[in-house]
Amino acid sequence: MTEHTPNTNTPETAGPEPFEAEDWIRTFAVAPPEHVDLPPHHPHCLGCGPANPHGHQLRVRRDAHGVYAHHSFDSRHVGAPAIAHGGAVATVLDDLFGFLLYTVGELAVTRHLAIDYLAPVLLDTPYTLRSHIHSRAGRKLHLRATIENNHAHVVTTATALFLIVDIDHFLTPRHNASAATAPTTHEDQQGPQMDSP
Ligand SMILES: CCCCC/C=C\C/C=C\C/C=C\C/C=C\CCCC(=O)SCCNC(=O)CCNC(=O)[C@H](O)C(C)(C)COP(=O)(O)OP(=O)(O)OC[C@H]1O[C@@H](n2cnc3c(N)ncnc32)[C@H](O)[C@@H]1OP(=O)(O)O
């Protein structure tokens, strides 16, 4: 059995200090107008952090419907040759959903993310990503997103359930992780049932 070795290659991308959650909440109050980029979640965020050389450095603005970004994947995100890795696409969409919180004004995190890869997302190709709030029910934010190419063809769609949390979620992450229990079964988490052998 291989002994687990901690990844020490990327000290510059260490996770955020707890105080950053409070800084981030404060930016809700001063969210910029439509023609200015929204602030990144934090400088090292994998999706949008400008100081993360391994990240996507997504730049997001809001509009009348929600939020949007223009983005190209590159050779760092390759899956099949010339095609973006599905996980990289999911990362960017999850992060884009995170920008909708500026329009909600509350903290929330991804509980469920579902993606339809309708057509390959090509490397070094410009795409427009859009996301909006489909509905809200109490703590539950039902979110939707699309990726479309320059010919207005939608190549990816996504839905997400974000759950509103309080700031303690970010200030005590280790406590929250150890408090995790067996997942609750939800109908919309279930795929087709496998037949018994
Ligand atoms: C975007 C956040 C940014 C915050 C920024 C803050 C600081 C800045 C610093 C750092 C941030 C940096 C970057 C992050 C930014 C963006 C990235 C994008 C967003 C993410 O990447 S974020 C990471 C991934 N994310 C997680 O790390 C969450 C792990 N998870 C948990 O921590 C818990 O899971 C929690 C707290 C989410 C919920 O826990 P809980 O105990 O409060 O909730 P519970 O289970 O009770 O469910 C409540 C109700 O939702 C229903 N429900 C549940 N699941 C359902 C389903 N699938 N379908 C239908 N209904 C469902 C239940 O049935 C119940 O319904 P009801 O109330 O009616 O009974």
Image (spheres, helix red, strand yellow):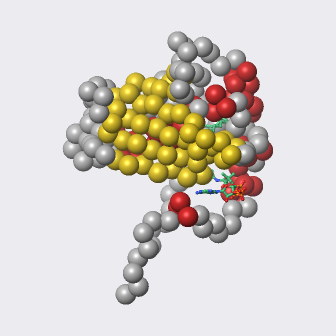
The location of residue 15, given as percent across then percent down, is 61, 40
Residue 71 picture quarter:
top left
**Which residue appears at 70% of the width and 38% of the height?**
107
- Taking 145 as reference, is 152 left or right? left
Residue sticking out furthest to the left:
81
**Which residue appears at 59% of the width and 32% of the height?**
100
- Taking 37 as reference, is 174 left or right? right
- Taking 124 as reference, is 30 left or right? right
Position of residue 6 relative to residue 141, above or below, is: below
In the rendered view of the protein, which quadrant contains the C terminus?
Answer: bottom left
- The total number of labels drawn is 0
Residue 42 picture quarter:
top right
In the rendered view of the protein, which quadrant contains the N terminus?
Answer: bottom left
Give 141 or 107, whichever is nearer the viewer: 141
The location of residue 137, given as percent across then percent down, is 68, 46
**Which residue appears at 55% of the width and 64% of the height?**
187
Give 10 or 150, whichever is nearer the viewer: 150
The location of residue 89, given as percent across then percent down, is 39, 41
Q: Is residue 91 visible?
A: yes
**Which residue appears at 73% of the width and 46% of the height?**
138
The location of residue 166, given as percent across then percent down, is 77, 42
Q: Is residue 13 visible?
A: no
Position of residue 158 relative to residue 195, above or below, is: above
Residue sticking out furthest to the bottom:
197
Residue 106 picture quarter:
top right
